[in-house]
Amino acid sequence: MTASNQFIPPVSARGRPLPLALVVLIVLALARTAAVAADAAPAADGQIVAWIEQLSSDQFAQREAATKSLAGAGTKAIEPLTAAIGRGDLEVGSRAVEILREMLGGDDTDVASAAEQALESLAEGADAAVARMAEATLDFHTLGLADAAREKLVSLGAVVNEEFLPSGQRGLAVLFNAGWMGVAEDLRLLARLRGVARLGLHGVRLDGASLAVLGRLRGIERLELYGTGVDDKAIAALAEKLPHARIDVRKGGKLGVAGQPIGACVINHVQDGSAAARGGVQPGDIILRIDGEPVASFEALTERVGRRGPGEKIELEIERGVAGGEPQRFKRTVELGGWE
């Protein structure tokens, strides 16, 4: 007679049956261990796809269960999750943003970083409703991270100061130049700063992700892009996102002078060691022409030089006052430097 269905009580090392209470505790412990192991096991691709499909289920409980499962699935779920948003289902889109928000606030830094990048991508996406939710999520997340972001950027060589702008607005002025030791990934920290009013990127190459971050600086008043390698199409897209910002784009050539904002192009200051200094330009000189074309103001000079790159040569026609005599007019060929 077989006894395959009979319960055989566990025995101790001495061969004696264990007390029933202890047996129950062992069974519960084993069950708990199995549950933890199941939760810790990475989700298969097919399982992730099934959970994503479940986000649009007619049953609320199934949508909630899928949301929770995907939030715990880690980086493996991020790419298929963001891809699913393209279907145009607002329920899926809103739950995807919620899932990414959960990942963003988790302890796993790799998952949080991947979720942040995914939200940044969604904030730039074509789905306006999802983009607004993603941007709001990112803004809320960055509120508590501003001080740490500022310290990190400064440690990498960024110059951060508070100042008043001509408009009267007080805010942060941030400059990246030759002292910048970070990489493109570090520029994402800009989005965590509060109150950036003026931003200068001088000689820092920008990629698509960096431009997306700049597009989120809604309160910025002046943006200087000198020698960043950004093309006209990207600049136009950036201008649409920042309609109230003055965007000053220069190819990278630097003359090294300062002038008065109104009236003729009178040079007030020549930077030591600059292209202008090497070319013999002096304070008080009036720039009349560049390469034969008239220059009506210092702003026009800046715009014209900004079209050129480092190492390119320009011909300046200069008028210089002479004490007790007629002003002199002469030409100088200047090889432009680069922004540092």
Image (spheres, rainbow, N blue to C red):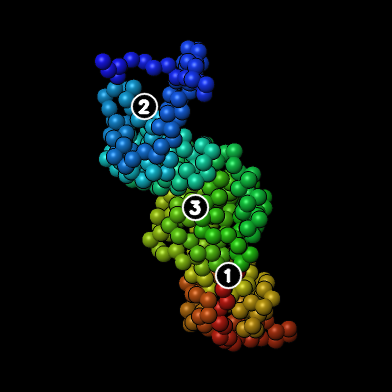
The answer to which image quadrant residue 10 occupies is top left
- What's the distance in space between the residues labelled 1 and 2, CA to CA? 54 Å
- What's the distance in space between the residues labelled 3 and 2, CA to CA? 36 Å
Amino acid at the residue labelled 1? Trp
Closer-to-camera residue (20/274): 20
N-terminal of the two: label 1 or label 3? 3
Q: Please tell me whether mark 1 sits on a helix, a strand or a loop.
A: loop
- What's the distance in space between the residues labelled 1 and 3, CA to CA? 20 Å
**Residue on which the image places disc 1:** 339
Closer-to-camera residue (31/182): 31
Question: Residue placed farthest to the top in the image?
Answer: 20
Closer-to-camera residue (246/134): 134
The correct choice, above or below, for 288 with respect to 95 in the image is below
Amino acid at the residue labelled 2? Ala
N-terminal of the two: label 3 or label 2? 2
Pointer 1 and pointer 2: residues touching (CB < 8 Å)? no
- Foreground label between 1 and 2: 2
The correct choice, above or below, for 334 with respect to 252 in the image is below
Q: Please tell me whether mark 2 sits on a helix, a strand or a loop.
A: helix
Q: Number of callouts in the render?
A: 3
Residue at left 52%, top 82%? 313
Amino acid at the residue labelled 3? Leu
Q: Please tell me whether mark 3 sits on a helix, a strand or a loop.
A: helix
Across and down, in percent, residue 286 comes to 61, 77
N-terminal of the two: label 1 or label 2? 2
Mark 2 surroundings: few (<14), some (14-19) or many (≥20) residues within 10 A: some
Which mark is on residue 214? 3
Residue at left 46%, top 34%? 102
